[in-house]
Image (cartoon, rainbow, N blue to C red):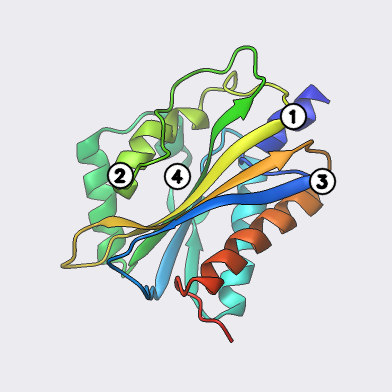
Amino acid sequence: MKNLILILLSLVLSGCASTKMIDTYKNPDHVVFTAYKVLLVGITPNEETRIAFETKLKNEFEKRNIEVMRSVDLFDVEFTVTAKTMDELDAVEQQLIDKDFDAVLITKLTGTENKQTFKQSMADWASYKGTFRDDYIQSQNVYYDTDYFDAFKIYHTETSLYCICEGKDRFLVWRGSIDITDPKNVERSMNDYVKLVVNSMESQDVIFRKK
């Protein structure tokens, strides 16, 4: 059971019993945000789960005619197994712009309740409104730190959308904070999480438009 939860949480997904949106933030300076090409990033040390999650997100975006790419198709193995500097991530952002990306969607674990030995490697993100680069720097150790997670009942996660548009300031567009309770079923959990994120973004006119 512990190994199963490790796999689930490595992509900050799961929750057969409950997957609930706790809070959302939308940048007030960008009431309607449109992106045409989005990079999908699941921060996890487990490649199989990362592929599955990013694929499910990709399918939902493509159903809505948004061009996307999974991070597993863009970043090689060496990229995620070693820590990156600010300069290196600046270069990555420029490469994304050169490839016509205008946004990055990143998903990660931010904390747990009742955890006995949670590694405090992430800051308090409750009021964070920085850039994709800053967020990645803070979170990237999850890729190669297999002791990062333990089995607890409630997991706090975040999915954040960043603008990396050419000629514009790079900023946080939208963030959803999601709690996952009593994780059990992998397939159902991923589906629930992805639908929750996409529906919330759609309801707030973030990339997707309400029908």
> Could you tell me if residue 10 is visible in this image?
no
Q: Provide residue 182's location: percent of width, then percent of height.
A: 79, 36
Tell me which numbered mark, 4 or 1, is placed earlier along the sequence. 4
Tell me which numbered mark, 2 or 3, is placed earlier along the sequence. 3
Q: Amino acid at mark 2?
A: Arg
Q: Provide residue 197's location: percent of width, then percent of height.
A: 59, 60
Of marks 2 and 4, the one in the foreground = 2
Q: Which mark is residue 16?
A: 3
* Outermost residue, left side: 167
Q: Which mark is residue 76?
A: 4
Tell me which numbered mark, 3 or 1, is placed earlier along the sequence. 3
Q: Relative to 58, is 162 above or below?
A: above
Q: Is residue 120 left or right of residue 127?
A: right
> Could you tell me if residue 112 is visible in this image?
yes
Q: Which mark is residue 153?
A: 1
* Disc 3 secondary structure class: loop
Of marks 2 and 3, the one in the foreground = 3
Figure quadrant of residue 133: top left
Give how far apart the Cα atoms at labels 4 and 3 are: 32 Å
Residue at 49% over, 71% down: 204
- The residue that mark 2 highlights is 133
Q: Amino acid at mark 3?
A: Cys
Of marks 1 and 2, the one in the foreground = 1
Tell me which numbered mark, 2 or 4, is placed earlier along the sequence. 4
